Image: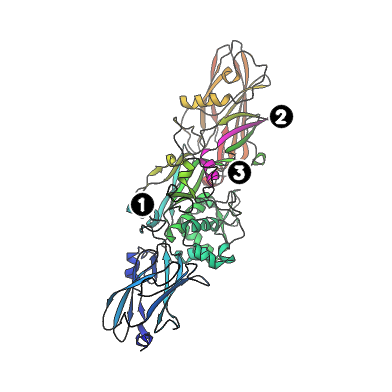
Amino acid sequence: MNFLAIIRKAMLVQLHCTENNQKHRTDDIAVNRLIVRRGQPFQLTFHAEQAFRPKQDFFQLVVQTGPNASEAKGTKSTFGLQAGCGFGKPWSMELSGSTDKTFTMTVYSPANASIGLYKLSMLTGSTTSTETSIGTLIVLFNPWCEDDWVYLPKEEERQEYVMNEQGLIYSGNCKFIESMSWDFGQFEDDIIDICLKLLDVNPKCLINAKEDCSARCSPVYVGRVVSAMINKDDADDGVIMGRWDGLYRDGVNPGFWSSSVDILRKWFKNACRPVKYGQCWVFAAVMCTVMRCLGIPCRVVTNFESAHDTNENLLVDVYMNDNGLFRNKEDGKDSIWNFHVWVEAWMKRPDISDGGIYDGWQVLDPTPQEMSEGVFCCGPAPVKAILEGETKTNVKYDVPFVYAEVNADIVRWMFRPDGSKIKYSTDRTSVGQFISTKAVGSDKRLDITNQYKYPEGQSPVLHFLCITCLTLYCGNKIISHYMPAGSRAERDRFSRAMRNMFISDDIEDVPAFQAVLMMIQEVVQPVSGSDIKLRLSVRNNRSTPQALSLQINAQAMRYTGIPTEHVYKEQNELQLQPYGGRTVTSTQHTIYVKFERWTQTQFCTCY
């Protein structure tokens, strides 16, 4: 008898969605549809008019994902109770229970199955039978499965980096670190469908869906696709359009977002048209949502004093005029961001090493900064490779760019009135400070700087919202240019940097970097909306009097390092006796400008 005829049409199969989803930790996503994690078994129960005879009755299941699914590509598997059934990435099943009217199969998916939406059907009677559809299931990555590339050993970390729907994102600057709450909401209604839609509209899938669905077995591949699809800077249906010029009237100010769910739903509802607008923390937060939803452990990371090195020479050129004012970015594309936010995803990297030396956290950055293989995406770059500075090897992907973000040298240039420029300092320690992420199981900040770079052996220079610098003149010659210093280690570092300054040949006696000693100190800690009070101590180390010109300038600067308005200027003349000193107290009066949180403009004040 054809076994198909004895299965009751009215109740063909029970998917046990609630029970299966609870065991696979996907019941927070849904309990009315089957959502499983690869490499972990699930159960199906079939109803029949008579007992199932496993040695006599022909019965097979078929799972397939994507168009033109094939066993050769690992996107289709036909399997039964016979050992070795199927090709490519075979699934399997075993009879786990039966009665006179029902039988239950335990189904095993491979730990390297492609993730995505699968069709589930059965074959009964013979191999030539027509497939009978019995439903669909969604397969996700499985950080609980030791054979999965995304396996994360510690349960408390799985709870934080996969299951936690709420989090903190750090911003501000390395002296004033702020946190903001964020709703990742990866298990909210319809987010799983939006995430799968994001994969289906990516350009690689539109060009060759068969190959794309096959490659979705790899978290490396999926990570790169998601990184590219979060931003709308390519010819794709990216989720978020970036904007940094403060003009948000036709969209939403990036600082007003606090939930990935709102952004993803808006993108999906508007036929995959980009949502306006986002900046680095928004890109990173939405990517974290997508990665966690798909089952890849993910966390949001903030790098303070983050370098944007456009030509991969590990140098960031900063330009000022002879009054100490920062010049516009047209002088160079490099910049130092007060902070920059990306994500880390946890995965193995057998694609670049058999020994597992690059397994673990990988940097992925969806903010559109530089192209990677012709697309605005970044990573996955192994954090271990960044730590070891492996910028000249073939370690994929984008290790040199991320290495520069945390290790680049800042080279400061000064333009003279005749248009020529001189290099006056090289700072090798300021970039890449207080690299931060939310701690596991608490709202504390976890500093992971030592995972990216080895200790300097001394305290880092602390740059903050009011970055100070001072230019001194003797006659018409620049004799010193100062960046802030507080601790002895910072002052020593400043002295060494001064040796790189341009020094005129006719300055006598003591080298220029020692001719005048200076230090700027805060009289009181700066408070938003209040005057800034600073104390300048100046000492003449020469045997002759010195006439000095002190110029004070205040300049607005966005958090991305782009200078904007010149908002304050003051000039004072000082007379220093031989080996004499002076103390000057300066009050920078509060300047009221349109200030939209820290997302649009921050202040960089030059003294």
Q: Amino acid at mark 2?
A: Pro
Q: Which residue is mark 2?
A: 417
The residues bearing labels 3 and 1 have C-alpha atoms spaced at a distance of: 35 Å
- At which x and y percent is residue 106? 33, 71
Q: Amino acid at mark 3?
A: Thr
Specify which label sits upstream in the sequence, 3 or 2: 3
In percent of the image, x 41 and y 54: which residue is there? Answer: 297
- At which x and y percent is residue 592? 56, 40
Q: Which residue is mark 1?
A: 157
Q: Residue furthest left?
A: 99
Q: Residues within 10 Å of mark 3 (few under 14, many from 20)?
A: some
Near-viewer residue (354 or 474)? 354
Q: What number is the disc on residue 310? A: 3
Where 544 sits versus 501, above or below? above
Specify which label sits upstream in the sequence, 3 or 1: 1
Where 95 sits versus 483, above or below? below
Q: Is residue 398 magenta?
A: yes
Please, what secondary structure does the residue beneath circle 2 have? loop
Please, what secondary structure does the residue beneath circle 3 have? loop
Q: Is residue 137 magenta?
A: no
Near-viewer residue (28 or 74)? 74
- At which x and y percent is residue 139? 42, 66
Q: Amino acid at mark 1?
A: Glu
Instruction: Give the residues drawn in magenta, as a range.
Output: 397-419
In percent of the image, x 45 and y 48: which residue is there? Answer: 358
In percent of the image, x 45 and y 53: which residue is there? Answer: 350
